Image (tube, grey):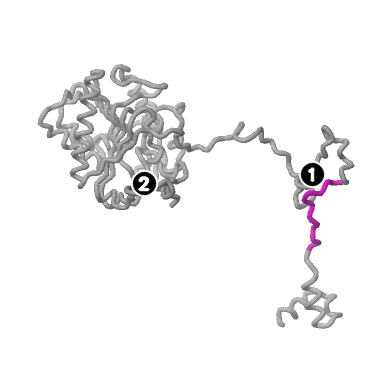
Amino acid sequence: MMLNAHRAAACPSAHRRSSRATVQVLAAAPPHPVQQPVIHVIPNNGKDAGRAINGIPPVMGAHLMATGKAAPLSVSKGPGLDVTPHPFQYPGVEGDASIVLHFSKSGVAQGVVKAVVDAADAAIAAKGAFTLVLSGGSLLGMLSGLAELKKAPQWDKWHIFFVDERNVPHSSSDSTYKGAVSAFLGKVPIPAANVRAIQENLPVEQAATQYAGQLLSVPEAALPRRDSLPVFDLILLGMGPDGHVASLFPNRAATSAPASAGWVLPVTNSPKPPPERITMTLPVINAAKEVVLVASGEDKAEIVQRVLEVQSLPGALPAQLVRPSHGRLRWFLDVQSASQLDITNWDDAKAFPRSQ
């Protein structure tokens, strides 16, 4: 009742009515006139049709907004015509992909070393050179077995590249190049000229351009091209807890860069320190003859499950966009990183891919 009394006091005309009438009047009086529906109503009963083409009224009832004004005309040219595509797109054709499950992290490391040696032998036999692209992080430690091989490969025919690199001095603890030297490069006789490291002390944009120049300088006999992209023999990738690969982070412009953007791009605002990096693009990664994506340990179980079983929006999980167009993709997992997967039910089309 106090609420009704307060409303009456706010309306001078209400003081001349009873309390009961006041409540009824205020409840029945809307603040604004109610607009009549105009759907399916032809203005002026179609009398304006003479001003339209082919006798069609210029405005139909369903084309009127709530204000009674004509809605803006559509400029669409038709479904899918002259539209701006989403910056991230899944490939239209599934590639050659498989999962290799190892019992332990050491088993994954042995599998990675074997994959590298096998790819090297095949490439050298086919074209006299082997191109290997490395990632940083824990993956580098798995390559220490390359320095302990009983049968030494033809090291002089190996060419080493980096899928991404931090824009730091080679002596920095953040340097992927330094990590690779510690893991195996400093222990095997690969010619120094065959190891393409980032040039130090350059602005990151120039560093990316310079590194792309290094790739272009490699003879096509060693690094063939397909559709203007380099075809590396083997690219090794790790994966971050957010699903990023190389320095291609979720929903970032570099992650959606087309082939025309170049082979190597600068990254100036990495969400993971240090902020400045260079990275190969997804088109370059997907042009490789083979990509091995490595994830081991319990801390990778959740992101492995999300990437392999959940259909996310394109770009939300960059690892889902790694799909070689003319090569093969292999996932190397251990029991811990694969612990949340439901592989036995993957053939159930109703259950996979999942939406969450």
Q: Which residues are magenta?
A: 32-43
Residue plotted at (79% across, 47% down): 61
Element under label 2? loop
Residue plotted at (39% across, 39% down): 248
Mark 1 or mark 2: name the one nearer the start of the chain.
1
Residue identifier under label 1: 60
Task: Locate residue 350 relative to residue 241 in the image: left or right.
Answer: right
How crowded is the residue under tag 1: few (<14 C-alpha within 10 Å), some, or many (20+)?
Answer: some
Element under label 1? loop
Which label sits in the foreground, 1 or 2? 2
- Residue 119, compared with residue 34, is above or below; it is above
Q: Position of residue 192 (x, y in %)?
A: 21, 25
Q: Observer-nearest residue: 225 or 331?
A: 331
- Residue 18, compared with residue 194, is above or below; it is below
Residue identifier under label 2: 346
Q: Amino acid under label 2?
A: Trp
Task: Locate residue 111 relative to residue 30 in the image: left or right.
Answer: left
Q: Is residue 173 magenta?
A: no
